[in-house]
Amino acid sequence: MVWFPLHRLCKSGAEPPGDHNWQKSDQCSMASPKKLQGLVAATITPMTSDGKINCSVIEQYVDYLVINQGVKNVFVNGTTGEGLSLSTEERKQLAEAWVTKGKDKLDHVIIHVGALSLPETKELARHAADIGASGIAGIAPSFLKPTNKDALVAFLQEVASEAPDTPFYYYHIPPLTGVKIRVEELLDGITEQIPSFQGVKFSDTDLLDFAQCVNKYQEKFVLLYGVDEQLLSALVVGASGAVGSTYNYLGKQYNVMLEAFAKQDLELAQQCQFCAGEFLSFVIQLGFGVAQIKEVMTFASGIVMGPPRLPLLRASQDFIEKANAKLKSVIDHFPKLP
């Protein structure tokens, strides 16, 4: 597997000044000297038929990502993982499972700790640091929203301060949060207020904003792109890596695109993006969301992901049959490295 270049190393080893009321678990620590780059799978939350989280399959899930897809980084409890539909205790259990089962197998386990409540977000941040996650990420609150940079930074600062020696990432997803503060503006001077700030998961189609972030901050921050169907465009402007749900089941294929891009074979990289886009375009027309992603992952991996949590409804049998056939066809015809 070949990763494309990353401009800075994710630092996680320095102990900051001050006293802490928790200690990292050496047994479960995911601290890694490896760069955070390449593909990051936005993990799905497995559930039992009666709607309870199913941590018993996480080890199998880890092995599937590493062995079958060539993906060694995960983003846990995000949008794909139905994070905001889970209880605080459920999110903690999932975080623990991923950190524990990913030890010595995964390079990075980033735990999303964002919530509508600041106290809940801070509690999740403390917990992620305590179990040794390699990073935490947070979204902007999406009900009572920050309306300017100062308010957003103040919120993120409160969260990051609960885990001061754990790398912190901002999860920018305005289509869902409604918070449209430009990331270029947010990054200006942010480490003066949040010393642990390491980068951004940029889940928006505004490539102008993303390109300006790369132009100004590529040497300083990890800039992860979060719109799978536009990954090649983001690579061209300098993305450090990519976080997405597609990498759960098309990671092997997207790694071909990354390697082609690294070798400056833009024609092959373009063919890969078109092929992956063919699948996404097909399922989007059928109706594609978190519920459908769970079904795709179930038939792609053989690991039962179970139903989504209400208010999401389970995918139809018609979707399952059509999406399964299309995915098999796309994988069979996916471009290969020469």
Image (spheres, grey):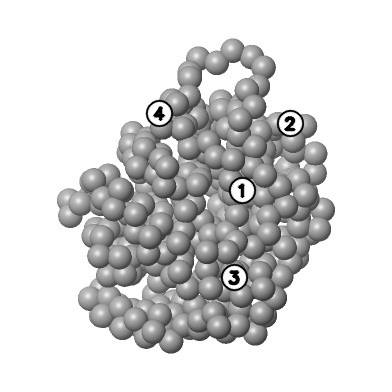
User: Are the two marked residues, 4 and 1, in contact with CB atoms closer than 8 angstroms?
Assistant: no
**Please, is residue 311 above or below residue 257 in the view?**
above
Amino acid carrying label 4: it is Gln
Amino acid type at mark 2: Gln
Q: Name the residue under label 2.
A: 193
Residue of label 4: 27
Residue 259: mark: 3
Give the mark nearest the N terminus, 4 or 2: 4
Q: How crowded is mark 1: few (under 14 residues within 10 Å), some or many (20 or more)?
A: some
**Is 216 on the left or on the right of 94, as rendered?**
right
Q: Which of marks 2 and 3 is nearer the N terminus?
A: 2
Q: What element carries label 1?
A: loop
Which residue shows up at 55% across the image and 16% down it?
20
Say which label, 4 or 3, has the lower sequence index.
4
Q: Are marks 2 and 3 in contact (CB under 8 Å)?
A: no
| Residue kind at label 3, given as amino acid type | Glu
Of badges 1 and 2, nearer the viewer stands 1
* Label 4 Cα crowd, 10 Å radius (few <14 / some 14-19 / many 20+): few
Where residue 206 appears, x then y in whole percent? 68, 65
Mark 3 nearby-residue class (10 Å; few <14, some 14–19, many ≥20): some
Circle 1 residue: 35
